[in-house]
Image (spheres, rainbow, N blue to C red):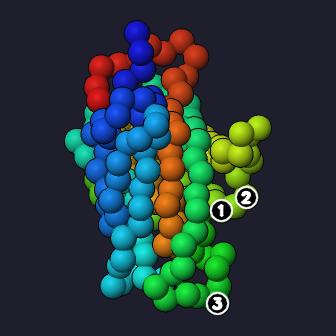
Amino acid sequence: KKNPWNFEFDIPNDTENFAGNGGSIMVSNGHLVLTAGESTVAATGHDSGIIYNNSSLTASKYEKVVIRYKYEFLPDTKPQDNFDSHSNLQFYFNPSTNPGLSESKSFRTRIDQTPTDDEGWHIAEFKLSENEHWDGVITQIRFDPTNHNGIYTFDYIRFVLKAGEKAESGN
């Protein structure tokens, strides 16, 4: 049985229940493409991501999440001297045991420091057990690629089952 929490974006125009969060999204050529929108509150003038509401992912079944992506930066509305502090790929999750999205319920990595594969795609991997709040049923997930203006292309987002676990229904 296919793991319903593996998002491959293989069907044209099917965002697999993701929505743009501060930006616009589309699915084309097997990829989900996020184009950053402007933000009046973000230091750079941009803070875009993709969000999946009403999920029902059982936290204890999953070992890690793997994201394959590319990015193309465009000029920021408000360029910043400290580029690094705005250049994190961040994965937020909302657990039923401690509701709400927050920094403490997230994983992050520098977008330009993730390894790349032979085709130039970046691969980010987060070990879910490394965050004490990864528990219960995950009711919402959000991926924020950076706080920069740009085009962010996701080839896939895969939640990898722990050894011996079976795929659950959902998505």
Can residue 58 be seen in the rendering of this structure? no
Regarding mark 3 in the picture, which secondary structure is present there? loop
Regarding mark 1 in the picture, which secondary structure is present there? strand
Q: Amino acid at mark 3?
A: Asp
Quadrant showing the N terminus: top left
- Residue 34 place in picture, x, y as percent: 42, 56
Which label was assigned to residue 110?
1
- Residue 46 place in picture, x, y as percent: 43, 76
Q: Are marks 1 and 2 in contact (CB under 8 Å)?
A: yes
- Residue 18 place in picture, x, y as percent: 31, 45
Q: Is residue 50 above or below residue 45?
A: above
Label 2, on which residue?
113
Local crowd at mark 3 within 10 Å, few (<14), some, or many (≥20)? Answer: few
Q: Is residue 170 above or below residue 135?
A: above
Which mark's residue is nearer the viewer, 3 or 1? 3
Which label was assigned to residue 69?
none
Is 57 positioned to the left or the right of 43 in the image?
left
Q: Quadrant of residue 67?
A: top right
x 35%, y 53%: residue: 25
For this orientation, the residue located farthest to the front is: 29
Q: Earlier in the sequence, mark 3 or mark 2?
A: 3
Q: CA distance from mark 3 to mark 2?
A: 19 Å
Quadrant showing the C terminus: top left
